[in-house]
Image: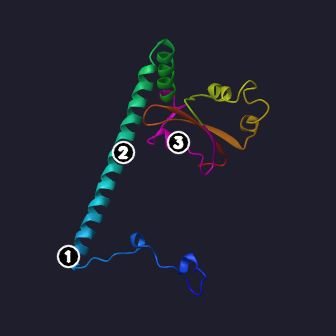
Amino acid sequence: VAFGVPLPRHAQAAPPEERCVLPATEEEGEEVQAEEQEENRRKKEEARVREAEEHEAKERKKAEEAARLTGKKAAKRAAQLERRLAEGKLQQSKKNVEELLKEQNEVVCTFRNVQDEAELRKQFGRKQGTTGPGSEYFSSSKFKFRFLVAKDGTPVAQIYRCPWP
């Protein structure tokens, strides 16, 4: 307080708990640094464990999804997938599903679990791509379709803008 007027907050001295305390000796400084390094190592290890758990959960979810696809329709669909691969109408890819579903470069639209044009048209609702949004993909020569199979066996449809190599 100067002349009965309190000083602004930034001009006041920091309370003792907020003040920076420097180590008294060099050894104490090294100990503090070692503790900080150990703390950082522990945090990184926890992050790695958390990431591994998330990865395991993803794998379990994929396994459950694959186990759920058992039945007569699933068997027919799997046979159709193999037949289309043999005919060359589907291309096997070395990429995973997430990479194939990215809409980048000339790829305009992508769909998971779509292996032919009939299934692709079903994705556009009741009009099936004949009118409304998405009709330009089927009526315009600017767009082509590519049907791929990811490395885990999931079919992916990509609509891309021509010309494309």
Report the mark closest to the observer, 1 or 2: 1
Mark 1 burial class by Cα count in 10 Å: few <14, some 14-19, many 20+: few
Quadrant assignment for the N terminus: bottom right
Q: Is residue 143 above or below residue 118?
A: below
Mark 3 burial class by Cα count in 10 Å: few <14, some 14-19, many 20+: many
Residue depicted at 47% across the width and 28% down the height = 86
Residue depicted at 55% across the width and 41% down the height = 101
- The spot of residue 85 in percent (x, y) is 49, 29
Disc 3: which residue: 100
Give the structural element (helix, strand or loop) at label 3: helix
Q: CA distance from mark 3 to mark 2?
A: 26 Å
Q: Which residue occupies the extreme bottom position in the image?
A: 3
Q: Is residue 41 above or below residue 51?
A: below
Tell me which amino acid carries mark 2: Arg
Tell me whether the residue at label 1 lies in contact with that at label 3, contact meaning CB atoms closer than 8 angstroms. Answer: no
- The spot of residue 160 in percent (x, y) is 64, 43
Residue 27 circle label:
1
Question: Which range of residues does the magenta coloring cover?
Answer: 86-110
